[in-house]
Amino acid sequence: MSDSTTKSGAELLIDALKINGIQNIYGLVGIPVTDLARLAQIEGMNYYGFRREDAAVNAAAAAGFITGKPGIALTVSAPGFLNGLPSLAQATKNCFPLIMISGSSDRNIIDLDQGDYEGLDQYNIAKPFCKAAFRVNRAEDMGTAVARAIRTAVSGRPGGVYLDLPAEAIESMMIDDKKGNNVYEIVDPAPSVIPSDESISRAINIIKNSQKPLVIVGKGAASARAEKEVKELIDTLNVPYLPMSMAKGLIPDDDSHSAAAARSYSLKNADTIILLGARLNWLLSHGKAPVFNESAQVIQIDIDAYEFDSNRRIDAPILGDMKSSLRKLIDAVHEQEVTVESQWLDDVQNVVLSNKEKMRTRLEAGKTSEPLNFFGALLPLQEYMNEHPDTYLVSEGANTLDMGRNIIDMKLPRHRLDCGTWGVMGIGLGYAIAAAVETGKRVIALEGDSAFGFDAMEMETICRYHLPVTVVVLNNGGIYNGTDKVVDNQPSPTNLDPRAHYEYLSSAFGGDSYVASTYSEVKDALVKAMDSNNPSIINATLNPSAGTESGHIDNLNAKIDLKKA
Ligand SMILES: Cc1ncc(Cn2c(C)c(CCOP(=O)(O)OP(=O)(O)O)sc2=O)c(N)n1
Ligand SMILES: Nc1ncnc2c1ncn2[C@@H]1O[C@H](COP(=O)(O)OP(=O)(O)O)[C@@H](O)[C@H]1O
Ligand SMILES: [Mg+2]
């Protein structure tokens, strides 16, 4: 390190990250950030090098969701920045706290459009895709830039922040004139936001007059780490709840209040919806009939007022952070001795039991399915997760994602990560790397065969860092399935090669490879792979006709009458 009176922008950046408890950087280096990554390692941080920037930025975003601190991604300028941009946008959409740092060109060359190496006005291009963008031009501004980036990423509605570092800011030196180098630990980066008494009493009055309240728990409650308060509200009112996919595990999925197996029944019949960190977006049919009861009243707790009335009237908006809001609401329930008739919960539980019995029958039949179907392929994962609930599960695909979500129970918070609000493919291996790095726990990445292809090369990253990640590829030979019609001998738009040996991508880099084509083979391979703690791929070969177009969301497809074509 330089003497005590001068420091480079790079040194100040690393000091600022470290003093705020940030330990890991996920990136892909090159001009002008290679030495920055080396310096981070010399200064005791961990740098994880990826094969493509979108996976590195996805990993940083997942690290943010899991830890609550902003994940840090590092890319080179222009093409590296652009490769990372979709993941920055996705982190912002998912409300994951992330800071994407990219090297960039010097302003005078960009602003005069003089044609720099990888020249691009990254700072302005990033703005529509993130919560905020900052550029650092001088070493002495580095401490302020990091403080603002961290606070912006984690406070209010969490999201992605872009930090633009021209080479001159990285290498410029700051003369420390004893004013201090402006690097400091931020005070209370995500302050509590306490809701008003009026908003709480408005909600209490609605619950008092409700016969059939349904709580919907979203990933906002997971990000808020409010699992204790969520469970206390549901237990106190003794009402059913629906977990959204990344809120699974806030309350163990086998809890008797879970309505997950009676989703349609509970949404349609509820007369009061209590939204806890969940948006009424496409994932919840915009809160509209016929999925919802049009006359139902809606209570919504959210840290961002912008979300209220986004899709329908919110009868009791509660603006606040999840923990503080739930604390006030639960205290008011106790003070006013609010109770709800238990008949509603009984009705939901009856539907749950009947639907669970139907699922159990399908899973049992899956054990002997030849060729293997989704039930036979997913049952071993359900069994494994029930026995090892501290395992992290990452999932992507269409049928693989939807059926995996309904079949595999989660028992712990923030242990399931998936395609999120945008339903994006290509998140799997980056998320899995972050889960393994940030927690040291074993990870299953449950991948459709198409989804796996988006970032399969990160298997080399997983093997290089020897991470305990088992990739389970459900290979049905295509996007959605492998039975699309072939026209004029062209490969179909959705078919892939069912004979593909995806598992070789593990042994190619020193990991373990398994092929399985029955329930028992998947079960045996999974136990072996997980017990080994080695990076591994299980290629589960399914019936190519297994799977429906777009999984559970075929209604969103633009339908064309192909007979006329
Ligand atoms: C970045 C990106 N590209 C394309 C898509 C479209 N898409 C794609 C390509 C999917 C893959 C489905 O096939 P799969 O093999 O992964 O899963 P199943 O066969 O089990 O359904 S699911 C889906 O919505 C997407 N969501 N995200
Ligand atoms: N700490 C928090 N307190 C309250 N609301 C939060 C908090 N963090 C995030 N949120 C909100 O949670 C919501 C998350 O919604 P969404 O991502 O749609 O969840 P899901 O997809 O699980 O339904 C966002 O509207 C966001 O503003
Ligand atoms: Mg497939």
Image (cartoon, grey):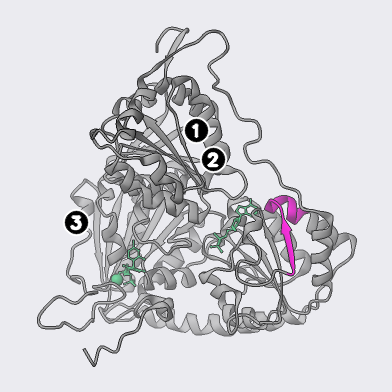
Secondary element type, mark 1: loop
Question: Can see residue 50?
Answer: no
Q: Quadrant of residue 346?
A: bottom right
**What amino acid is found at the position of numbered circle 2 in the picture?**
Lys
Residue 135 is left or right of residue 50, and the answer is right
Which residue carries the number 2 mark? 69
* Between 194 and 114, the one nearer to me in the picture: 114
* Between 549 and 89, the one nearer to me in the picture: 89
Q: Are marks 2 and 1 in contact (CB under 8 Å)?
A: yes
Residue 229 is left or right of residue 466, and the answer is right
Residue 142 among those drawn in magenta: no
Q: Are marks 1 and 3 in contact (CB under 8 Å)?
A: no
Give the magenta part as a residue range: 315-327
Q: Residue placed at 34% from the left, 84% from the top?
A: 559
Tell me where residue 276 appears, x and y as whole percent. 66, 62
Q: Residue placed at 39% from the left, 83% from the top?
A: 365
